[in-house]
Image (cartoon, grey):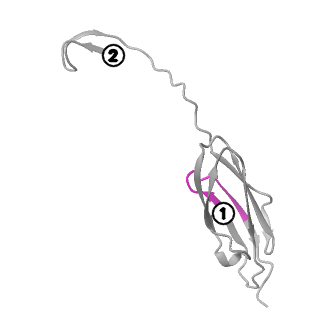
């Protein structure tokens, strides 16, 4: 550090060095832990998602579901949404439709947009085209 006389560009009248210790806490590896009740689901089942807090600040968070489309659900479950995080855990359910359409296995991914924390499960195609 320099001490100058009369201005920021004036004559240096004293100088010294010092260390600045970073005492801030490291951010967690993830702000949320996102889990599913199991890794593989069959059509007709309920996908259960739990979002647990790992130190995320309170506020509104958005989520996106990818790998599937709205027709894969028997209810009008949205593929996007939001939740007001107040420090607690949050649960979500998505009811898979027995759509009688041969699609093969699908991948369902639930992602919190702001943090990237996510979980992915496999959906077995158990209701094929008649």
Q: Is residue 118 magenta?
A: yes
Q: Which mark is residue 1?
A: 2
Q: CA distance from mark 1 to mark 2?
A: 52 Å
In the picture as drawn, the residue positioned furthest to the top comes out as 13
Crowding around mark 2 (Cα neighbors within 10 Å: few <14, some 14 to 19, many 20+) is few
The answer to which quarter of the image holds residue 76 is bottom right
Give the SS element for disc 1. strand
Quickly name the residue at label 1: 109
Residue at point 57% right, 56% down?
Answer: 113
Give the SS element for disc 2. loop
Residues in magenta, as a range: 109-121
Vertical comparison of 7 with 95: above or below:
above
Vertical comparison of 17 with 116: above or below:
above
Is 127 placed left or right of 11 in the picture?
A: right
Q: Position of residue 15 (x, y in %)?
A: 31, 11
Q: Is residue 105 magenta?
A: no
């Amino acid at each position: 550090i320099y001490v100058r006389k009369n201005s920021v560009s004036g004559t240096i009248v004293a100088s010294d060095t010092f260390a600045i210790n970073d005492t801030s806490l490291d951010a967690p590896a993830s702000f949320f832990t996102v889990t599913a009740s199991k890794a593989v689901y069959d059509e007709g089942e309920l996908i259960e998602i739990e979002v647990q807090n790992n130190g995320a600040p309170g506020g509104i968070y958005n989520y996106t579901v990818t790998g599937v489309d709205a027709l894969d659900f028997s209810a009008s479950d949205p593929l996007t949404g939001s939740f007001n995080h107040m420090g607690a855990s949050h649960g979500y359910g998505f009811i898979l439709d027995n759509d009688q359409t041969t699609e093969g296995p699908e991948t369902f991914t639930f992602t919190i947009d702001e943090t990237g924390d996510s979980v992915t499960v496999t959906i077995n195609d158990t209701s094929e085209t008649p």
